[in-house]
Image (tube, helix red, strand yellow):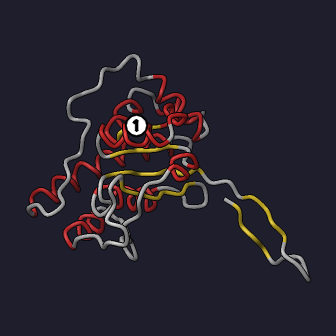
Amino acid sequence: MLLTDPAEPGGWRSYHRRVFSILVVCTGNLCRSPIAAQLLSARLDTAKFEAVSAGTRAVVGGLMPEEAVEESKRYGGDPTGHLGVQLNRQMAAAADLVLTAEVAHRASVLELFPAAVGRIFTLRQFARLAAQLSTAELGMLSPSAVVTAVAAQRGTRARLSDDDIADPYLGTAARYEAAGRALDAAVSGVVRAFTARE
């Protein structure tokens, strides 16, 4: 991330502060991906990590439904100011890790930016594969190395049929609550992978 700092009298000095960028993707960018990104932001050190979200068919500028807002708050997220954003190639290219709500979203990201294949997972997939690594193993790794180590587990662990987190949009309160529980559990697994060294 490029920041500017007026520390030098009479001019601006540019410098780089590197944060690990996590992009979360769903369909409309109104429920699942914003909730997950908000929970990641609440649970990871924002001086080291940045979590953003986007949709493969986003409701650009759209607001989160009240039920999604409540689910984010229930698990510690801050939904203030979220507006729907359309996924683009630049976002996929810039992210250090891409996490998706469904397998189909993962395929959409790969269509945009195939070179990111080693760092794209569904939320549940990443959490499940990371759980195969011990806290001691994860604690020795940088965030980028964590992604590499988790990716290495793909060949040894078959994909489960429940990798998708169902879209609650326009659904019942029970569907939003189920999505909230699933997102909380998956995000907890992601956070464990990146905080083991703390």
Residue, x 52% and y 35% (percent of image)? 147
Q: Is residue 10 above or below residue 139?
A: below
Q: In this view, does 26 lie to the left or right of 47?
A: left
Label 1 environment density (alpha carbons within 10 Å; few <14, some 14–19, many ≥20): many
Question: Which residue, as the protein is rendered here, is positioned at the far bottom?
Answer: 10
| Residue drawn at (12%, 56%) of the image | 175
> On the rendered structure, is 139 left or right of 58?
right
Q: Which residue is drawn at 38% across and 51% down?
A: 25
Residue at image coords 54%, 48%: 95
Q: Where is residue 49 in the image (x, y as percent from the top left)?
A: 55, 54
User: x, y (%) of residue 94?
Assistant: 58, 49
In the picture, measured across the screen, residue 70 lies left or right of residue 47, that is left
Q: Is residue 53 above or below residue 136?
A: below
Figure check: 117 above or below 172: above
Nearer to me, 176 or 136? 176
Q: Nearer the viewer, residue 77 or 89?
A: 89
* Front-lying residue, 123 or 192: 123
Across and down, in percent, residue 100 comes to 36, 45
Residue 80, compared with residue 121, is above or below; it is below
Give the quadrant of residue 37: bottom left
Q: Position of residue 139 (x, y in %)?
A: 55, 36
Image quadrant assignment for residue 74: bottom left
Which kind of residue does numbered mark 1 sit on? Phe
- Identify the element where label 1 is drawn: strand
Residue furthest top in the image: 156
The residue beneath circle 1 is 121
User: Where, by quadrant of the figure, is residue 48 drawn?
Assistant: bottom right
Which quadrant is the N terminus positioned in?
A: bottom right
